[in-house]
Image: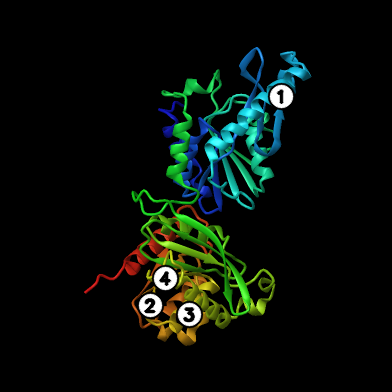
Amino acid sequence: MMFLDRTDAGRRLGERLRRLRGEDVVVVGLPRGGVPVAFEVARAMGAPLDVIVVRKLGVPWQPELGMGAIGEGGAREINEEIVRLARVSAEELAAVEEREHTELERRARRFRGDRPRVPLRGRTVIVVDDGIATGSTARAACQVARAQGAARVVLAVPVAPPDWTARLGGDADELVCLDTPELFASIGQFYGDFTQTSDEEVLALLRQAGPEPSGVPGSGERARAEEVEVRAGPMRLAGHLTVPGDARGVVMFAHGSGSSRHSPRNRYVAAELNRAGLATFLFDLLTPEEEYDRGKVFDIGLLARRLVEVTGWVRERPEVRGLRVGYFGASTGAAAALRAAADLPGDVAAVVSRGGRPDLAAPRLEEVTAPTLLIVGGRDDAVLYLNREAQARLHCEHDLAVVPGATHLFEEPGALEAVAALARDWFVGHLAPVAAG
């Protein structure tokens, strides 16, 4: 398989990895050549992009031959066989390490500057390079990701030698490669254009990607993302606010039972809304301690009251003040969203329910005035029945969208993408600023 250049390779690799889009993903590229590939993967995934800086340890008299690698945070990978065959002494190895460690620190400062690292803890981290030769730098990068708390590490490359999986050991949980040709001499032989990537190109791609999914396409402005804490009565609730440049509305997420602001499905939908120019606020309706209390998990009145209180807080945030507010609810969170919308007639501009339980808000459904979209999987029979029953009680503008072949969690190929597109179109249509008369 031949690639036109690293951009072409990244696009093809991104297509292979699209199945991971529902997960809480961060893409990290290995500077320099891996970053253009990683940029396209991150764009295909709707995920933030960062770098992991590693340095190859070359044999002193044959630098292109890697005998190991080091990475940020003290990661170290040595190919003992190459060290033995090349007869590199301990003193010579130490000298190479010291020199490359200095260069590693310089490059880390160069590429990162005052730009904060994208948090990896608890997330799926896709480590991307433009290919595998010895595998040492890739292993070191995977070790860095693991040390920073990655829950799952996926190593993805366009091309590698046939025995590449044996070279990687257990440093990655999953290995993805587009081509493993038998006649493998170097990575560059599989690229039409394998021009060296410059520091400036890496910096430009990192600036273009931003630390979180970007806002309005073509706006040139980076989304602002912030972890916050909101008071709801005596409780403090954790949340994540993302505001793209020129935001045209704000969508608040009400999660279902057993879920939180870290829900990969809701984060995926939120990223799609951000790209459409909508701010999003994902927050926990319950504290970590309350999540174990089944009485509170299904107390729709409590959840709705907290959503109303937090809505007031969101309306006062300078970044989104004056924007129209929408609710996106999943499962029991959908019932809380509908009940809160009934409590705030005229203040909530739109509601979207994903696999929701609107029946749990039955006593208040007739009072909902916000345009409401109910999204249900075609194979989620019980919930589909409940949504049809609830739809008959709505007096506002409403619609029921059935995603063919999808079950309750929308895990089937293309199902979550359909949900995100439906939600995006509904919110864009109903949260657009009202023109002054």
Dot 3 alpha-carbon crowd within 10 angstroms: few under 14, some 14 to 19, many 20 or more:
many
Proximity of marks 4 and 1: CB atoms separated by less than 8 Å: no
Can you identify the residue that label 3 sits on?
A: 340
Can you identify the residue that label 4 sits on?
A: 326
> In what element is the residue under mark 1?
loop
Residue lying farthest to the bottom in this orientation: 363
Mark 4 to mark 1: distance in Å?
55 Å
Query: In this rendering, would 139 be left or right of 304?
Result: right
Q: Amino acid at mark 4?
A: Gly
Proximity of marks 4 and 2: CB atoms separated by less than 8 Å: yes
Q: Point out which mark residue 79 bears.
A: 1
Dot 1 alpha-carbon crowd within 10 angstroms: few under 14, some 14 to 19, many 20 or more:
some
Displayed quadrant of residue 423:
bottom left
Which residue is located at x 65 percent, y 12 percent?
61
Q: Amino acid at mark 1?
A: Asn
> In what element is the residue under mark 2?
loop
Which residue is located at x 44 percent, y 72 percent?
315
Mark 4 to mark 2: distance in Å?
9 Å
Proximity of marks 4 and 3: CB atoms separated by less than 8 Å: no
Q: Nearer the viewer, residue 150 or 281?
A: 281
Q: Between disc 2 and disc 3, whose residue precedes? A: 3
The spot of residue 216 in percent (x, y) is 36, 54
Q: Between disc 4 and disc 1, whose residue precedes? A: 1
Q: Point out which mark residue 370 bears.
A: 2
Query: In this rendering, would 392 be left or right of 85?
Result: left
Query: In this rendering, would 165 be left or right of 399?
Result: right
Dot 2 alpha-carbon crowd within 10 angstroms: few under 14, some 14 to 19, many 20 or more:
many
Could you tell me which quadrant the C terminus lies in?
bottom left
